Image (cartoon, rainbow, N blue to C red):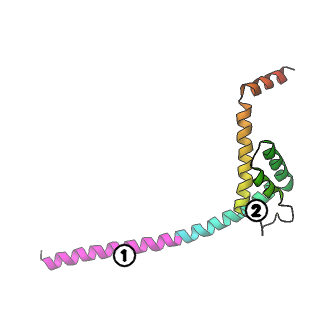
Amino acid sequence: MSTIRKDKELFEEANRECEKDDLRMLTLKKEMKELKKKTEIDRNNRITRGMIYYSAERRKELLDKADELKYSRKTIERLRNIDDRQWNSDLVDNDLISEFQTIEKYIGNFSQKKSKSPFSILGKFINEAR
């Protein structure tokens, strides 16, 4: 086989690989665009559902409990300043929903630790015996 023929085959092979890569890049760009669109829809849905779940009553309950458990006073005060007029889709964002979710997890974690302590178990046992 001549050198020119071999070089041409190698060139054509490299060219085919570049075309495959370009096609794959185009496919990935399309998938990325679709994923961004889906992510935006999912975030908006999360915010809407979070606004319903974290109603005024639920927010007050969580903040009161978090205050009892010595959660960050600065965060609690900032979140307490959000009234019902501000609890709308123009002002509530994903980060704010996440903050209430974090407080809820903090309270849940604290309750789990407390319920596993020996004194808590003893107290439950005494109360059930009555």
Q: Measuring 33% from the left and 72% from the top, which residue is drawn there?
A: 17
Farthest-out residue, front: 74
Residue 6: percent from left, percent from top = 17, 75
Would you say residue 35 sits in the magenta stretch?
no
Q: How many residues crowd around disc 2 within 10 Å: few (fewer than 14), some, or many (20 or more)?
A: some
**Residue 33 or residue 87, whichever sits in front:** 87
Element class at badge 2: helix
Q: Which of the two discs, 1 and 2, labels the residue nearer the N terminus? A: 1
Which image quarter is the N terminus in? bottom left
Would you say residue 5 sits in the magenta stretch?
yes
Q: Measuring 78% from the left and 46% from the top, which residue is drawn there?
A: 66
Tag shown at residue 82: none
Range shown magenta: 1-30
Residue 58: percent from left, percent from top = 83, 51
**Residue 69 or residue 113, whichever sits in front:** 69
Q: Disc 1 and disc 2: Cα gap in Å?
A: 44 Å
Q: Are marks 1 and 2 in contact (CB under 8 Å)?
A: no
Q: Quadrant of residue 91?
A: bottom right
Element class at badge 1: helix
**Number of the front mark, 1 or 2:** 2
Q: Measuring 23% from the left and 74% from the top, which residue is drawn there?
A: 10
Main SS, magenta residues = helix
Give the amino acid type for the residue marked by disc 2 in the picture.
Thr
Question: Where does label 1 land, which residue?
Answer: 19
Residue 8: percent from left, percent from top = 21, 78
Give the amino acid type for the residue marked by disc 1 in the picture.
Glu
Question: Where does label 2 land, which residue?
Answer: 48
Is 124 situated left or right of 1 in this image? Answer: right
Is 58 situated left or right of 32 in this image? Answer: right
Q: How many residues crowd around disc 1 within 10 Å: few (fewer than 14), some, or many (20 or more)?
A: few
Above-or-below relation of 91 to 64:
below
